[in-house]
Amino acid sequence: MKKNVIVIMTDDQGYGDLSCMGATDFKTPNLDRLANEGARFKCWYSNSPVCSPSRAALLTGRYPANAGVRAILDGHRKATGLPKETLTLPKILRDRLGYHTAMSGKWHLGLAEGCRPQDHGFEQWFGFLAGCVDFFSHIFYWGMNREGPGMNPTHDLWVNNKEVWKNGEYLTEVITEYSIQALRRAKKDSKSFFLYIPYNAPHYPMHAPQKYMDRFGGLPWDRQVMAAMVSAVDDGIGEIFNELARLDFIEDTITFFTSDNGPSRESRNWLDGTLDPYYGGSSGGFKGHKFSLFEGGVRVPGIVHYPGVVPASKIVEEPFCSFDMLPTICEWLHLDISDMELDGISQAGFLEGKQPALERDLFWEMDDQTSIRRGDWKLVLNGQIVEGQPDEDHVFLANLSKDPTESKNLSKSEPSLTTELKYAAETWRADLEVNWKNNFKYLNQGTT
């Protein structure tokens, strides 16, 4: 049998919100264990500072716009999303290798028929389709108080495209339960499996049962509830790995863990009408957060666990992007994907310790922001630190090896390099816009 694959993604979890990534005010022992037994990435990047595009990149190996998703997608039941013709990791593993494919958690890649998980390779799935739901009622409330007609609340919980009701059950725990059911089903069927577990914690609304809150009673509320929500995820991952061990899957399973983007500063996190930015999540000292192309918006936690292949306690300093996951997994599975158009690259040999990391330019876009990383250099055009408020420097250049927090703008002192990187970033963005116009304009997605 082929190796099994598990991909775990959290939601709005900042770089500094795991104890193995530097958090000192709460512990995540199960994720710490995965990092100790595998590799921990000090420079894992999401491909977008917001959720839908970053998820599209993770599952397709493409830049988000090249996959057909470049904006936060709507949550009403007619909302379009990831085009059906876009190839995804579960689809190619199911169709080419006969894998059992399952998902448990947050989709946020479209609600309309043709965009749902079963349209993208998942044989079994549980979860919700919009961007966020109440953790106990599983109702999508976002938009109901917006200017204009707003949006009515919508219940959003499904099993294999059939609506189900689980009133009062804490969603993080239910996601774990369905993940374990998927493992048992794969064992019963004697099939290799791909399991995607996109937890919605710690995305707002900030909800956690008292048993988790009590673990962190000494922290301020905003940090306490963040720690409680992440702790519930960590407990769930511990339960999943206990089940993997019981089913004798551990040694034959590749596991990736990451977050979709940096921590949210959105005032709606407070739940009390407070309009101040929310401070519960940590970017680990990096500049920016969700919605920003500075490091805090796109540099996120990253762990890979592959016993016997990826050395234990490996620390990865080199940049790795979410869209690299698909080609890396496919190389480990000896799956020929030369017919697929990809933007990510396989770093399998590097992660095994057999060859240097492959170098390339990395690019990001979000609204008017565009950025590029080349080696140690990072250029951000029209960057913003706070959502909707442009940074005072329209061109910002930093050397991340010397200034990882992007505190000093070197664009004036490095004019030649700035011009070179600016041209590369603008050329990439222009090509992206052409591709979007030619292939995806019909989707009518905005860029916000």
Image (cartoon, helix red, strand yellow):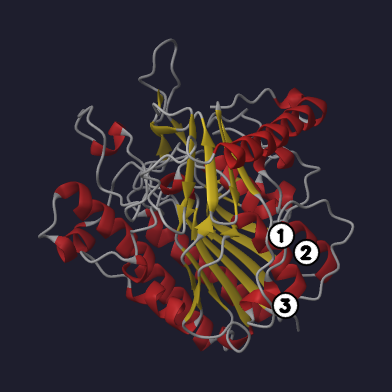
Look at the numbered discs 2 and 3 and tell me whether their residues touch, using CB distance below 8 Å: no
Q: How many marks?
A: 3
- Decide: is 40 above or below 211: below
Q: Which residue is mark 1?
A: 90
- Binning the other alpha carbons within 10 Å of mark 3 as few (below 14), some (14 to 19) or many (20 upward) gives some
Mark 2 to mark 3: distance in Å?
11 Å
Look at the numbered discs 1 and 2 and tell me whether their residues touch, using CB distance below 8 Å: yes
Q: Residue at x 48, y 34 (%)?
A: 412
Residue 94: image tag? 2
- Decide: is 396 above or below 299: above
Amino acid type, label 1: Pro
Q: Earlier in the sequence, mark 2 or mark 3?
A: 2
* Quadrant where the N terminus is found in the figure: bottom right
* Label 1 residue SS: helix
Q: Quadrant of residue 68?
A: top right
In the image, 319 versus 114, the foreground residue is 319
In the image, 420 versus 51, the foreground residue is 420
Residue 249: image tag? none
Give the percent coordinates (x, y) of residue 370.
58, 34
